[in-house]
Amino acid sequence: MSGSNIYGTELYSSHGEPDEQTAPQLEDDASDDGDSKAQEQSASRVRQGEVWSELFKTAYGRDKVFKIMQYSLRVYLLFHTTATSSALLRGHKRPHWEAAVFNRLNTAISSFSLTRKCLILFNWLPPLNSILAQHSSDPFTSKPGSSKPKPLLHTFLHTSPPVLLELVNGISDDIATFSKLGLINKKLGERAGDFADWCWFVGTLVNLVENSVERSVILAQQHQVESRLYNESMAGTTSKSNPTNDKLDRKDLTRLQRQDYWIQISRWKLIMDLIFVSYNVFRWKKAKGPVQTFSGLAAAFLSTAKAFDRHKGALVKARSY
């Protein structure tokens, strides 16, 4: 099981824009141009190897890279099995070493799966800390003059559903992982795994709704900027006659387009997750192996691309200042 994080507008938010009609604004605009050029130069100096190094420093990054390796092997075995069982090759005698290689690859796939589950152990700690922080910030009841401590259960019941879902999901997933490690009863682990799949399914649906709402806001803002640029062009305003507004609008448009791009990447990743987990939740059997293999590999590439871009952006930003 894997988490589904959306990198939305907060990842690529811009700083406050300067006022439009003052002389200092022109200086700020020149400063922004300098910052943009500095970031472009920093981006050209950041090597891919450095980004991968930063990515592998995190458990999340290692999890996603191992996921690519795991599902790439599954794709290979899927094609291999399909080819060897075809009418063309069915009667041919297979090499003696093929079975040994096949078994080793299956062992590697299982090992990657267990390794990934161990990497994401205790993912329920961040939502738990969030709930405890909320409880400690408001420890008393809302009644005036009351000093009676608010019970922790009250805070849990008033926590947002996505946070509670993430907490329960992480705990259930850990129980299933401990069962695979032999530390917990197998039957209990299977039940916890089924419950974790349901949490993953519901959480993915919630994230898809949030993703759609977020994209609608971005598209509305993008439409406003495009309309403003169009109206200025129809009115005869050019980048020479009003360079400040034109630069700000185009910079804003580029930022919004970038946000929209990564929101769409997140949406496709969530769709792949939804397809994958639906087979587990509803116990579908038809084409389960191929569908889960390709949807898992696609989700792995999409989530790795998002993580790679995030780490690259952090390196560029660090070298720009």
Image (tube, helix red, strand yellow):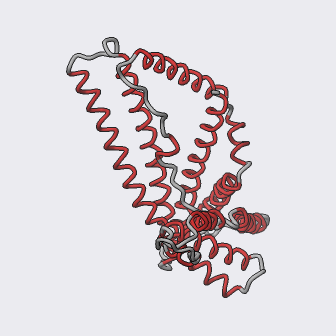
What residue is rendered at 54% in x and 60% in y? Answer: 4
The part of the image, by quadrant, that contains residue 184 is bottom right
Q: Say which of 69 and 310 sits in front.
A: 310
What residue is rendered at 67% in x and 36% in y? Answer: 48
Residue lying at the far front in this picture: please name it: 145
The correct choice, above or below, for 72 with respect to 308 in the image is below
Position of the C terminus, as image quadrant, is top right
Report x, y in % for residue 136. Answer: 61, 66
The correct choice, above or below, for 148 with respect to 222 in the image is below
Visible residue check, residue 102: no
The part of the image, by quadrant, that contains residue 22 is top left
Report x, y in % for residue 181. Answer: 77, 76
Q: Is residue 227 left or right of residue 300?
A: left
Q: Say which of 237 and 285 sits in front.
A: 237
The correct choice, above or below, for 108 with respect to 255 in the image is below
Report x, y in % for residue 175. Answer: 68, 77
Residue lying at the far top in this picture: please name it: 240
What residue is rendered at 52% in x and 72% in y? Answer: 288
Residue lying at the far left in this picture: please name it: 235
Visible residue check, residue 49: yes
Position of the N terminus, as image quadrant, is bottom right
The correct choice, above or below, for 138 with respect to 37 in the image is below
Q: Say which of 85 and 34 sits in front.
A: 34
What residue is rendered at 55% in x and 71% in y? Answer: 140
Report x, y in % for residue 28. Answer: 48, 20
Q: Say which of 1 and 91 sits in front.
A: 1
Q: Please state the total of marks drawn on the protein image.
A: 0
